[in-house]
Amino acid sequence: MTELLLRPLLEGFGADFGDSVVSVALDGGASRFRLDKIGSAHAIRVSWNLKPHNYDYLMAFYRTEIDFGSLPFTIKMKSVDASDLQEYTARFLGPPKLTSFHGGIHSVSATLEVVPLAHNESADQALITGGPE
C-alpha cells in the first residue's frame, strides 16, 4: 500500500469518531442501545500548508497513486486513538480542497476516512484504574 509522505498540520485537525453503537428512541421511556459493529471508521479533518512542489506531489498522489481517491493508502499523523503519532490506513472522502494560496503557500484541506487502530484492553484498563492526572 502506498504511503502519503506529507504530515498534516496539528492546527485544524479534527475527528468525528466512528460510532459502533445503534440506538433506538422509545416512546415513553429511555432509548435502547446495542453494539452493532466493531471498528467503525473515523472521519478525520486534516490540512496542509504546502510549497509548490509539495502541492504538486499531493495532487499527483491523489490522481495516480490512489486513483482519484478510490484506493486506500497509509499516512502517519497525530493519533486519534491515543496521544502520539501513528500510521493509519486511510481513504480520501472527496478530493482535497485548495482553501487559499498566499505567498507561495497552498493551503489544502481534506477529510480522510481512517481505520481505527486496534486497542490494547489491558493498557486501557490500567489508564482507567489510574484515573486522570
Image: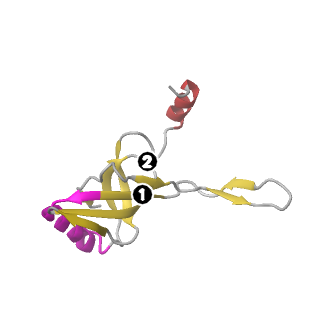
> Which residue type carries mark 1?
Ile
Give the label on residue 94, or none.
none
The residue shown at (54%, 24%) is 130
Does residue 7 appear left or right of residue 70 in this picture?
A: left
- On whether residue 59 falls in the magenta region, the answer is yes
Does residue 119 appear left or right of residue 93 in this picture?
A: right
Give the CA separation, mark 2 to mark 1. 9 Å
- Please identify the quarter of the rendering in which residue 15 is found: bottom left
- On whether residue 96 falls in the magenta region, the answer is no
Q: Residues within 10 Å of mark 1 (few under 14, many from 20)?
A: many
- Please identify the quarter of the rendering in which residue 33 is found: bottom right
The residue lying toward the viewer, choosing from 80 and 39, is 80
- Regarding mark 1 in the picture, which secondary structure is present there? strand
Residue lying farthest to the front in this orientation: 102
Q: Are marks 2 and 1 in contact (CB under 8 Å)?
A: yes
The residue shown at (44%, 56%) is 115
Q: Residue 19, percent across and down? A: 57, 56
Q: How is the image coloured?
A: secondary structure
Q: Residue 89, percent across and down? A: 37, 57
The residue to which callout 2 is attached is 80
> Which residue type carries mark 2?
Val
Give the label on residue 44, or none.
1
Q: Is 13 located above or below residue 60 in the figure?
A: above
Q: Residue 47, percent across and down? A: 32, 58
Residue segment shown in magenta: 48-68
Q: Residue 79, percent across and down? A: 39, 46
Q: Is 33 located above or below residue 129 in the figure?
A: below
Q: Which corner quadrant holds the N terminus?
A: bottom left
The residue lying toward the viewer, choosing from 38 and 133, is 133
